[in-house]
Image: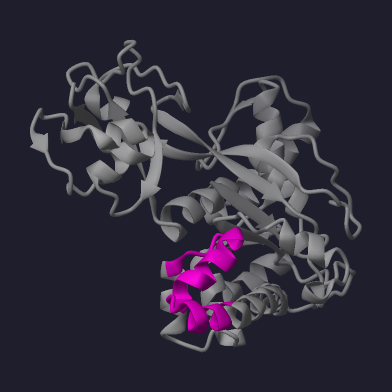
Amino acid sequence: MLVGIVGCPNSGKSTFFKALTLAEVEIANYPFTTIQPNQGMAFVTKECPCKKLHVKCSPKNSKCEDGIRYIPIRVLDVAGLVPGAHEGKGLGNQFLNDLTQASGLIHVLDASGKTNAEGKPEPGWDPEKTIEILESEIDEWIKDIASKAFNKSKTIAKTQKKPIERLLADQLSGLGITEDHIKKAMKESEPDSLEFASVLRKISKPILTAANKIDLPEAQENFHSLKQHAHTIPCSADSELALKEAAKHGLIKYIPGSHDFDITGSLSEKQKSALEFIRRNVIEKYGSTGVQLALNKMVFDVLNLIAVYPVADINKFSDSHGYVLPDVHLVQKGTTLKELAYKIHSDIGDNFIGGLNPERKKIGAEHELKDGDVVEILVKR
């Protein structure tokens, strides 16, 4: 899975990316600091079943600290978007092409309104305009691709008598668009329209807005109107990065996304003052810096994924090598046990006969998995 970090220049996008990944990226206050996309690994967080099951886990594809499971997610920080990007302005073509495989987008927005959609200083700029511009540019980009694909598919559908939805899905699969996405969008509009592209964007590239720079008074004032938009999280990437760096150097104990931190090292008065500012103006006001919350919300709420833990031995909650709760899989809400079997390995799916839950009760192929489920998959020997 890939989550794209998008936004206009000077929105704090690269700082947000670094705060999530601690990757070394160039951060500067001028447009197009990010030329080539930065790829990194971030983590979504969930309470690990080890607490409820009273076992000490030994993760393999993730990590567990103090009963919190950290599940890796690929994130991509792309070049800043400017008005006219779909026509190739700025680094528009590169920006949009880099997003093709993203499952969802986090729009890092300068909520303070100090910079406009081109990343230039413009005090009093309405950040809601930036949301409209970003969505419009992605819609126009999808429309251009979808219209060409539709014209090509329309001809083939007539001559070969194939469903146009399937042909369109083949043409648009590179954007992560499926036949199901197309069927839903076609119920609302014609395939060569902007409305069709907008519906496809909402389904295949859902956007969560991270209202960044919330530590600034102007951003706090603007957030009253911004929060009316669906999936909008107040955040301060600068604050999250400062806390993570302090934790990395042993100065504080901090769990990403938590409601507070503890000072554990020797700090200068300047460092104490900076940390107290973050505590008072960000964490106490909004519950967290918002950076981790934004990624968690994108994965678990917007993309509707759940975390499940398949094991080989339900009695010990372990795999065949004795690792306890070794792997966590992120799957779509509504995934069945047999579908999970196929996601793990085709051989497991082909030889599937059922499963067991922690109460040692048998569960069948159509059993719908729930978030945090631990299951043993039974196969033919």
Give the residues drawn in magenta, as a range.
Answer: 153-179
Q: Which colour scheme is used?
A: one colour
Q: Is the magenta stretch mostly helix, strand or loop?
A: helix
Q: Give the percent coordinates (x, y) of residue 319.
A: 31, 18
Query: Which residue is at 34% across, 10% downward?
Result: 321
Q: Which of 113 and 148 is in front in this view?
A: 148
Q: Give the percent coordinates (x, y) of residue 131.
A: 67, 74
Q: Give the percent coordinates (x, y) of residue 27.
A: 84, 46
Furthest-top residue in this view: 321
Q: Give the percent coordinates (x, y) of residue 191.
A: 54, 84
Q: In which quarter of the image is residue 316?
A: top left
Q: Quadrant of residue 163?
A: bottom left
Q: How many labels does the image show?
A: 0
Q: Which of 264 and 202 is in front in this view?
A: 202
Q: Nearer the viewer, residue 7 or 97?
A: 97
Q: Is residue 343 left or right of residue 61?
A: left
Q: In this view, does 53 lie to the left or right of 7?
A: left
Q: Is residue 201 visible?
A: yes
Where, quadrant-wise, is the C terminus in this rendering?
Answer: top left
Instruction: Look at the picture and state if 271 lies above or below 127.
Output: above
Query: Which residue is at 88% across, 52% downward?
Result: 33
Instruction: Look at the picture and state if 15 lies above or below 98.
Output: above
Q: In this view, does 8 lie to the left or right of 230?
A: right
Q: Is residue 262 left or right of residue 46?
A: right
Furthest-front residue in this view: 159
Q: Quadrant of residue 235?
A: bottom right
